[in-house]
Amino acid sequence: MKTPKLHTIENGFSLIEVLVTLLILAIGLLSIAAMQLRGLQYNQDAYMRSQVNMLAYDIADRMRLNRSNLAAYVSNYTVPVTTPTGCTEATGSNAANDLACWHVQLHNGLPPNSTAAIAVNAGNPNMYDITINWSDRENTPRSVQYTFQP
């Protein structure tokens, strides 16, 4: 006697299984997009900190080249919306031109309304402080202060 064959009919996944799969896939893709966005934001913050470092070291080096006129570098500056003028790189090291060129670099590297200050250090008159303030992408105020001896 022959045994009857059982026929199973498979029509594929059910609609619920497909929807659950799509939900899991969508959550994964949104997570990847969120991580990418966060990475870009952190990259922008790191870029701004790098810019601030380069700007501070630039003016410190300019001051070291012109040690005889250090008092002329002491100043406060707010980065304007429009590009500042007065920078002539070919004139050599003079405090007014150095500050004018640094102001152009501040304008190119920092957001508008950022501030920069160069002051004699309160604790040691042979040292100088460079303070740069800016607002990050979330409008959080950031500040860095460098103390150096020219």
Image: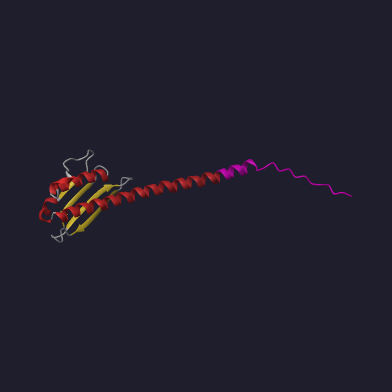
Asked whether 58 or 74 is in front, the reply is: 58
Q: Which residue occupies 54% across, 45% down?
A: 25
**Viewer-proximal residue among 114 and 140:** 114
Which image quadrant: the C terminus? bottom left
Residue for point 77% across, 44% down: 7
Name which quarter of the figure residue 21 lies in. top right
Residue 101 visible: yes
Image position, residue 30 (x, y; %): 48, 45
Residue at the left extreme, as displayed: 68
Total numbered labels placed on residues in the image: 0
**Image location (x, y in percent) of residue 32:** 47, 47
What's the magenta region? 1-22
On the image, which quarter does residue 149 sit in? bottom left
Depicted 148 relative to depicted 38: above or below: below
Is 46 contained in the magenta span? no
Whether residue 78 is visible, yes or no, is: no
* Residue 14 vs residue 130, the one in the foreground: 130
Check the image and name the residue furthest to the right.
1
Give coordinates of residue 110: x percent, y percent. 26, 45
Q: Describe the colour scheme in one phrase.
A: secondary structure
Any magenta on residue 9? yes
User: In the orientation shown, which residue stands out farthest toward the top?
Assistant: 82
**Where residue 62 appears, x then y in whole percent?**
17, 52
Q: Residue at x 26, y 47 (%)?
A: 134
Residue 64 located left or right of residue 110:
left
Residue 147 is left or right of residue 47, and the answer is left
